[in-house]
Amino acid sequence: MPVEDLAAAHWRRFVYLKLARRWHALWCRWSPSGELRSVFDAERAFEPTGKGCSMQVVYHYRDERGTVAEGPQSGPWHLTEEACSTPHGMLHPASPEMTTLLLPGGPSAWCMRRSPAGTPCAAELFLHHGDHLRMSAGVVHSADGTLQQLALVREDARGPWPSAAAADGWSESCEAAAHSTADSGEGEAGGGRRLYTVEAHWDAEGGLAEVRWLVFEA
């Protein structure tokens, strides 16, 4: 398949081309040692436009900053196929050095297009649980390769936090705990368990060459 056709097929996986959604989020960031660095509420809103999608992020900080709805980290941004769809993934207007890799149904990864030695590296993995819950896990490494920050964003489309129902929503806990590798990235699927693994491969120049998203059913 020609590269242009692959890019077009990838763009069509972007669920917000047809789905309007406002995600209400609890955003937590930790140091590598597990110390809570920041916690705040946010909204990530997507609205189909016919030619693409508009996106805006509203931050509700719990300090003197208050609510921030405009600026370089908030948008709004207008995502179109002409401007954002590339053979390397979907680009975001605010972060041209990053790319979004889309899977059918909504799961995605936001990562650096190139990660040569001696430069910082960041990635965020998005997963859905049913129609109304989504989460993302972000990792940032410094230029020397050491872990700099871990983030977890829990989102509920049904309304502002606390998450709609304790039995059917996210916990508000901000505690950090260590788990074995075998326990990470798992979720329930059809009464069994599903393990997600992402493999990323870079070329000799530090460019993203291949990403494999592996799903194991148990």
Image (cartoon, rainbow, N blue to C red):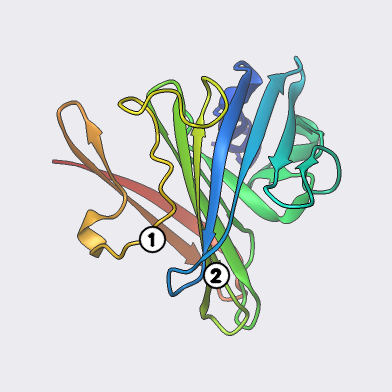
What's the distance in space between the residues labelled 1 and 2, CA to CA?
34 Å
Q: Give the image location of residue 195, x and y in percent.
A: 25, 46
Q: Is residue 104 visible?
A: no
Q: Quadrant of residue 19?
A: top right
Q: Residue furthest right?
A: 71
Seen in the picture, residue 169 relative to 216 is either above or below; the reply is: above
Which label is found at residue 128? none
Q: Give the image location of residue 86, x and y in percent.
A: 69, 43
Q: Secondary structure at mark 2?
A: loop
Q: Give the image location of residue 4, x and y in percent.
A: 66, 37
**For this rendering, which residue is in front, 31 or 21?**
31
Q: Give the image location of residue 1, x and y in percent.
A: 53, 36
Seen in the picture, residue 152 relative to 59 is either above or below; the reply is: below
Identified at 53% across, 53% down, the residue is 28
**Which class describes the residues within 10 Å of circle 2: few (<14), some (14-19), or many (20+)?**
few
- Looking at numbered disc 2 in the image, what kind of residue is underneath it? Asp
Which label is found at residue 203? 2
Question: Contact (CB < 8 A) between labels 1 and 2?
Answer: no
**Which class describes the residues within 10 Å of circle 1: few (<14), some (14-19), or many (20+)?**
some
- Placement of the C terminus among the 4 image quadrants: top left
- Looking at numbered disc 1 in the image, what kind of residue is underneath it? Ala
- First in sequence, mark 1 or 2: give its number: 1
Which mark's residue is nearer the viewer, 1 or 2? 1
Q: Quadrant of residue 184?
A: bottom left
Which label is found at residue 176? 1
**For this rendering, which residue is in front, 113 or 65?**
65
